[in-house]
Image (tube, rainbow, N blue to C red):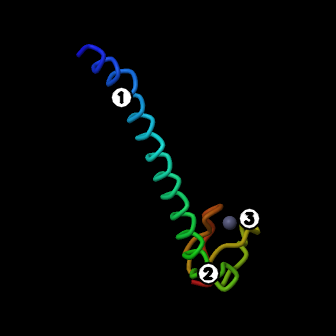
Amino acid sequence: MEVVFVVIIFYVVPASVLLYWIIKAAVRRGIIEAHREMGKHTEADKPKPDSIAKITCIGCQKGFDMDYPKCPHCGHKNPYI
Ligand SMILES: [Zn+2]
């Protein structure tokens, strides 16, 4: 009977743990791949940044969206709003 326990402890348990880790890693990789695919799709669906009206800040000469009431870089007031 003792042999059965030894077999279970030294073969079945490590084998199942190993299998568990392999499955977990595979699932995680699958999830990451799925997310990457989703990211690709959402990236494609988003409008290009060039399509958003941009203005150049008077304070720091950096570009920012026309919708912003203030420059996100230096806080200079948007003269077009
Ligand atoms: Zn600025």
**Is 57 placed above or below 20 here?**
below
Q: Residue at x 59, y 74 (%)?
A: 43
**Mark 2 Cα shell of 10 Å, populated few (<14), some (14-19), many (≥20):** some
**Of label 3 and label 2, which has the lower sequence position?**
3
Q: Secondary structure at mark 1?
A: helix
Q: Residue at x 43, y 40 (%)?
A: 19
**Of label 2 and label 1, which has the lower sequence position?**
1
Kindly identify the amino acid type of the residue bearing the numbered disc 2. Met
56 sits to left or right of 41: right
**Of label 3 and label 1, which has the lower sequence position?**
1
* Callouts 3 and 1 close, C-beta under 8 Å: no
Q: Residue at x 41, y 28 (%)?
A: 14
* Callouts 2 and 1 close, C-beta under 8 Å: no
69 sits to left or right of 13: right
The N terminus: image quadrant = top left
Kindly identify the amino acid type of the residue bearing the numbered disc 1. Val
Q: Give x and y (percent) for residue 29.
A: 53, 53
3 or 1: mark nearer the eye? 1
Residue in front for this viewpoint, 71 or 76: 71
Outermost residue to the right: 61
Q: Is mark 3 within 8 Å of ligand 1?
A: yes
The residue singled out by tag 3 in the image is 60
Q: Secondary structure at mark 3?
A: loop
**Is 19 placed above or below 71 here?**
above
Q: CA distance from mark 3 to mark 2?
A: 15 Å
Q: CA distance from mark 2 to mark 1?
A: 62 Å
The residue singled out by tag 1 in the image is 13
Q: Residue at x 55, y 61 (%)?
A: 33
The residue singled out by tag 2 in the image is 66
